[in-house]
Image (cartoon, rainbow, N blue to C red):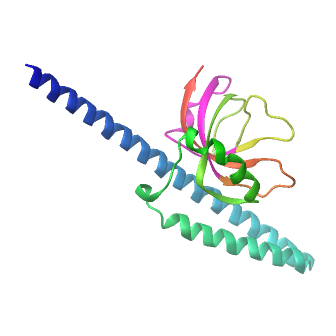
Amino acid sequence: MNRNIFILAGLSLLVIIVLYADDFLTIKSGCIQATINAITWELENYQNKHTVAEEKGDMVSAQKMAKRILQCQEELKRIKAITPDKYILLDTESQNGNQLLFEKDKIFGMLMPPLVKHVTITLKEKCEEKKLLYIDGITRSGPFYHVAGIVDNYENLKVGKRYRLTIYLVYKKEYFGFIPNYYVYISHYEAM
């Protein structure tokens, strides 16, 4: 009888480990796709700015945008080559001491590994790609979090409801000053 209890306990633990690993791979896959989305959108943005600069004859701005386009293309190639099992995620405790390092040293571009944050929002408008999340405490100076992906379906988040979200900051947008502005992947949400 004791042997059966140990076997059952061992199998239960194995199921929990497998489910946890599967959830972790889902988050990693979501972060990869959200990063691809973010880079693609920024690439389009820089291409449009490059065209406008060339049309205006502003070669300094055109060269700057050409450099940004190349960086986005390199990042896109790099992220597309990463498989979920090779993608690195840090838990909240592991990243705490490194947060300033990530944010100070990165002017813009993908964050590897991404930063994880827990935020609270009241959804003011339909949640969809590129939309700004109006987190509690947001000011005119940020932080700004734009949606690049979600764990399941945007339709599950209802306008007017409060949610506690777990988000991964996957890409830092180019923005003036030190105002934090990111694309994020929503890995978990819970109605409050």
Report whether 134 appears left or right of 119. Answer: right
| Residue drawn 82% across the image and 74% down it | 64
Quadrant for residue 133, please give it.
top right
In which quadrant of the rendered image does the N terminus lie? top left
Quadrant for residue 72, please give it.
bottom right
Q: In the figure, 116 relative to 51: above or below?
A: above
Report whether 80 appears left or right of 4. Answer: right
Q: In the figure, 66 relative to 142: above or below?
A: below
Count of numbered marks: 0
What residue occupies the far front of the structure in this picture?
97
Magenta-span inclusion, residue 131: no
The magenta stretch is 146-170
The spot of residue 6 in percent (x, y) is 16, 26
Report whether 132 appears left or right of 31. Answer: right
| Residue drawn 48% across the image and 50% down it | 28
Report whether 23 appears left or right of 178. Answer: left
In which quadrant of the rendered image does the C terminus lie? top right
What residue occupies the far left of the structure in this picture?
1
| Residue 148 visible within the image | no
The spot of residue 90 in percent (x, y) is 53, 46
Q: Report the front residue among 52 and 114.
A: 114
Q: In the figure, 112 relative to 54: above or below?
A: above
| Residue drawn 37% across the image and 43% down it | 21
Magenta-span inclusion, residue 155: yes
Q: Report the front residue among 60 and 100.
A: 100
The spot of residue 3 in percent (x, y) is 10, 25
The spot of residue 2 in percent (x, y) is 11, 20
| Residue 102 visible within the image | yes
| Residue drawn 68% across the image and 46% down it | 99
